[in-house]
Image (cartoon, rainbow, N blue to C red):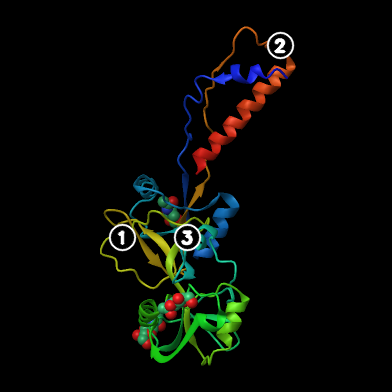
Amino acid sequence: MDRRMFGILLFSGLFHVAFPLHRPRYNFINESKTWLEARQHCREYHTDLAAVNDEQDLVDLGSLVDSEFSHVFIGLQRSWGWSFSDADDHKEGEPSYWNWASDEHQEAKHCGIIKRTGKWFAANCSTPKKFICYNESTTDLSERFFFYYDLVDWPSAQAYCRERHTDLARVRNQLDNEALQALPLSFRTWIGLNAESWVWSDGREPSFIPWRPQELLGVADCAALDVNSKPLGIVDKDCAEKLPFFCYTEPRKKYLVEVKLTADDSVDMTDQAVLDSILKTVTVHILTFDEFLTT
Ligand SMILES: *[C@@H]1O[C@H](CO)[C@@H](O)[C@H](O)[C@H]1NC(C)=O
Ligand SMILES: *[C@@H]1O[C@H](CO)[C@@H](O)[C@H](O)[C@H]1NC(C)=O
Ligand SMILES: *[C@@H]1O[C@H](CO)[C@@H](O)[C@H](O)[C@H]1NC(C)=O
């Protein structure tokens, strides 16, 4: 193909305008369900339980219900993570090595212990237990973990480990877990797991959680909109409670894109090779552009 053509087929106007055409569409479901049942309903009939990204989303949700209702579930729940987490952990979402005894976490137990079997369990953060700290900068397993016999609650153990080492023990893989098992573990020993952070049910990390003012965060594991609070705010709610709920429906991703191509007279617009080349160039630019919009 004529090399010169690439020089000529320049995008003069490039992409003139582009905008997503819709905000998320919310649905209020006037049926009382537990948080899990509600999520199942939303995933079946809509996209997922509602997530909010900004103040306007909150107002949109509030406008769907009247004051006869008090609390309405949204798609926010507690999520487990390591006390020490580097940037990579956050990018990956859930860590790759996970050794829970069971998937079911009991309400109000937000800190992690390891038992002699090597399995992890959720426990009440306030109860005193032995604990294990670790040093992130050493890869030598015999020098990585430090066992303490003192009985302390989880926050105190965390503070101690952060002062003397890196943090409460973080377990990256099976080898780490085996190294912990080789320590004189008692029945229950704190490691660096906790459920202090929250995540949207579609897996996104929240950038905006408008907790209801004056509300000290309780111990429940799911969240609801307090429809009567002013300004509107979110409260933690027991996942097993039965409440009405909000779903959202994913707006179709649609962009309006205007492209202007210029070429001089030497380019034969009836030549199939030229048309193919134009199509290819435009496609590549749109893909790049889409990537730009979604990052
Ligand atoms: C919600 O459901 C209840 C009982 O099923 C009904 O009495 C009430 O009118 C409904 N409210 C709305 C706003 O749809
Ligand atoms: C956790 O333990 C503390 C102290 O032992 C106790 O006061 C508190 O009620 C417990 N919390 C729950 C939710 O069981
Ligand atoms: C952590 O390990 C590194 C590398 O072995 C060592 O230089 C450092 O002193 C250790 N830090 C602590 C607090 O033990």
| Contact, mark 1 vs mark 2 (Cβ under 8 Å) | no
Residue at 45%, 40% in the rendered image: 23
Residue located beneath label 1 in the image: 212
Is residue 184 at least partly visible in the picture? yes
Q: Mark 3 to mark 1: distance in Å?
A: 29 Å
Amino acid residing under circle 3: Ala
Horizontal side of 96 relative to 108 (left or right) equals right
Measuring from the top left, give residue 100's x and y in whole percent: 58, 76
Horizontal side of 259 relative to 125 (left or right) equals right
Could you tell me which secondary element the residue under label 1 belongs to? loop
Quick one: label 2 or label 3, which is nearer the N terminus? 3
Amino acid residing under circle 2: Thr
Measuring from the top left, give residue 74's x and y in whole percent: 44, 57
Could you tell me which secondary element the residue under label 2 belongs to? loop
Towards the viewer: 186 or 88: 88
Q: Mark 1 to mark 2: distance in Å?
A: 64 Å
Residue located beneath label 2 in the image: 270
Is residue 110 at least partly visible in the picture? no
